[in-house]
Image: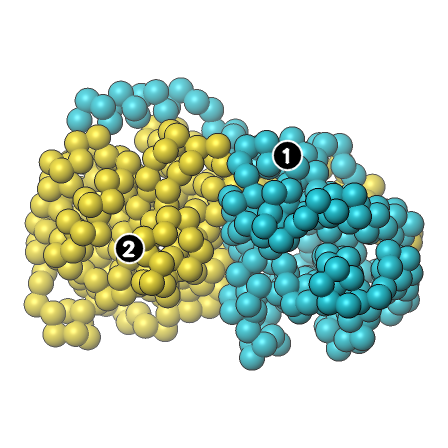
Chain colours: A yellow, B cyan
Amino acid sequence: MMDRRNFIRKSAIAGTTALLLPEIVKAALPESRNDRHYLAKGETILFQGDSITDRGRSRKEEDLPNDQRQLGSGYPLFAAANILANNPEKELKIYNRGISGNKVFQLADRWEKDCIALKPDVVSILIGVNDFWHTKTGGYTGTVTTYAVDYNKLIADTLKALPNVKIVILEPFIIQGGSALDSTWESDFAPYRDAAKKVAEDYDLSFVPLQLVFNEALKKASAAYWGPDGVHPSFAGAQLMAQAWSKCIQ
Amino acid sequence: MMDRRNFIRKSAIAGTTALLLPEIVKAALPESRNDRHYLAKGETILFQGDSITDRGRSRKEEDLPNDQRQLGSGYPLFAAANILANNPEKELKIYNRGISGNKVFQLADRWEKDCIALKPDVVSILIGVNDFWHTKTGGYTGTVTTYAVDYNKLIADTLKALPNVKIVILEPFIIQGGSALDSTWESDFAPYRDAAKKVAEDYDLSFVPLQLVFNEALKKASAAYWGPDGVHPSFAGAQLMAQAWSKCIQ
């Protein structure tokens, strides 16, 4: 018993403020960010994107808000779990409509059905890795300019249809050291990240700098821990994304 | 744009300390609890229990620590996500070996293989609802005394085999208003909760009072939100459990 008792005594000394405060996210995101959105009663939150967002979500339940199968097993699930546990009185509705393989023009193709029709109050978008990746592996001929122009138009159209919507742009990112990346990714993918950031700035949107978050995370553990292929986060990486996202939406 | 800008200005006023602090858990658990365990490098954490713990975990990957499929989709997943995101440098190993339908004697039957052999540093146990439920629906003839005696022996055997293990007892709970409960549950299940608490007290173990947590949660939203059948938490309920658990293990 003595070991446990000693242990308990030691533990009691530490404060309680560190509880659940995500160290990596705190290091990556300055506390002064002024783009926080506090959820109001009855709001609808939509996650949009590619496979990182999709993560095996069930299409059968896609019209059931807050359904675990509908949300998949990636960062939307972890973000939703946190939001729903912390805001039970708000009667929120959370949807995931990410689709694996999507590039920004494919979001545009299905935007009326998979965004506007849901009348979201918050739209969270993570798109861009396939706009680059598929030029290397899929014969896709779009450039970073295509990405920037398409993304710009998507946001303009969204704000036209839903003038009061809060849009959160998640920075496309890579996890250095991942097995799917070669040496060209670091330099060649950077312009896509810059383009996503510029869209957020131009339209005064919230922006979650996920590349910073993962760069910070990589100081503590390798890509094998955060996302073995460098593109798709592990669930520890997904939780990190959810924590970063929660700095914008609470 | 004006709406969004106004919104952003208002949001910036609120402090950052509320970030991710779980309101319900704070209300249910006093800050002075002295049973916190800070995880050390290389520690192994084991979740044990019944269907609430199992939640569809894959048996195929059960020897792969930190594997999302192995962890299932319940509170062990959400607790593990938080632990792994917040402790990347610690090289922790997290396992889930919950099995649906288990009563405490069934944990004992497989304890050598599914607990002792894993040499855990932390064992988290949630067991008891079936010890009661199956007397009503499954023809099981064990009583609350059977439960208390078996649970006592399980803990004694565990501490004999693993003298330095930290054991966390999760209080068995019901979510009032759930569809699987009838009016007898409130009074007849209470002795099982008391028995679990007494085991924790007798052996100086950490205890997570989940009934308090769910009672607090029910002030904000109904069983439909936290666990429709009153026994199995929704993922919002699972996240709440993980938050409560995280007050003992960080």
Q: Residue A97 carries which label?
A: 2
Q: Quadrant of the N terminus of chain B?
A: top left
Is B167 on the left or on the right of B60, as rendered?
right
Q: Which of marks 2 and 1 is in front?
A: 1
Query: What chain does badge 2 belong to?
Result: A
Quick one: SS at disc 1? helix
At x 11% / y 69%, what residue is drawn? Answer: A140
Residue at the spot 47% in from the left edge and 24% down from the top edge: B15
How far across and how far down the image is residue B106, in percent?
78, 71
- Name the amino acid, label 1: Glu
Residue B195 in picture, x, y percent from top left = 85, 50
Q: Does label 1 lie on the same chain as label 2?
A: no
Mark 2 residue crowding within 10 angstroms, few (<14) / some (14–19) / many (20+)? many
Q: Where is residue A206 in the image (x, y as percent from the top left)?
A: 28, 37
- Amino acid identity at mark 2: Arg
Disc on res. B216: 1
At 60% from the left edge and 36% from the top edge, which residue is drawn? Answer: B218
Q: How many marks?
A: 2
Q: Which mark is residue B57?
A: none
Quarter occupied by residue B176:
top right
Q: Where is residue B171 in the image (x, y as percent from the top left)?
A: 74, 49
Residue B12 visible in this rendered orientation of the protein: yes
Chain holding disc 1? B
Secondary element under disc 2, as helix, strand or loop, is loop
